[in-house]
Image: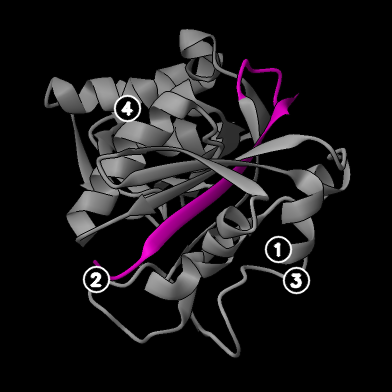
Amino acid sequence: MFGWYISIIDESLKVSNENRFALLAKWTTSPRGENWLIDLVEAKKAIYHSHIDGTGRCRAIASDVLPIIANGPPVGINPIVLPGIPKHPVSENWVSDITFHHDRMASCQPDQKLIIDVFNYLAWNDYINYFEETEKKIGYFEFKVKLSDEDDLTTGKLAQWETGTNGLNYFDDLVKTNQATLVKKGGYPMTYKVLAGDVLHLLMDGSLFHIDNTWTADIIVYHDRIARCPQDRMLTIEAWDMS
């Protein structure tokens, strides 16, 4: 084991008009990065509920948690801030992939009970599996998606939008039928390759943004560029996790 994935959720808040809880913060950190939570449990300010397949779950009151994370992940003095999750041990004090929703934290009532999940990932692939299976079931993914023609600089980006957990289902279905390739997993970004003919018509009529009743926002479609794009062109879809 060389680190933890930590997320903090407020069950009382809902976001993006979906039936899902609000993520307040998440980050990955070194083995000692959960010491603050151990201290809360020992001080009886947090309740430890479960430990299943390396995942621990605690509940604590916002007034006991939010001051601790007010200035970022509580991971010790002068931690090494990494651009991504390491594939091997780095040091005794590191942190990466930090996401803090300060607006949600500010609206959180002091007596609100929070869920704190701590995932012990033994290897990079274990983390990826957890990221895809467990988090997707919880349902607090938000993606910023960019679709582009990287082979033609005159065409470039064809569309971009933001979407929820189900917003990538169409591309996942294409992968299952060998009509698309999942090049990179993990959300930083998740990257697909797909033929233009399998997706451009859905961009033109807007139906891609309403598959599986998902939510979408900030949609930009470059119709003139799409019109110039050959149907047999291999396109790139990048989906960045913003949750």
Of residue 140 and residue 158, the one placed in the foreground of this image is 140
Q: Tell whether position 2 is magenta.
A: yes
At 13% from the left and 20% from the top, the residue drawn is: 177
The residue shown at (35%, 33%) is: 134
Q: Which residue is mark 4?
A: 171
Which kind of residue does numbered mark 1 sit on?
Ile
Position of residue 99 in the picture relative to residue 125 (left or right): right
Q: Quadrant of the C terminus?
A: top right
**Residue indicated by mark 2:** 87
Provide residue 37's location: percent of width, then percent of height. Answer: 56, 59
What SS does tag 2 mark? loop
Q: Which residue is mark 3?
A: 71
Q: Is residue 142 magenta?
A: no
Q: Nearer the viewer, residue 70 or 64?
A: 64
Query: Could you give the CA–CA distance between mark 2 and mark 1, rounded to whole angstroms?
Result: 25 Å
Disc ID at residue 232: none
Quarter of the image where one finds residue 159: top right
Task: Answer with left or right where residue 53 lies relative to residue 93.
Answer: left
Task: Name the kind of residue labelled 4 in the image.
Answer: Phe
Q: Amino acid at mark 2?
A: Lys
Tag 4 secondary structure: helix
What range is drawn magenta here? 1-20
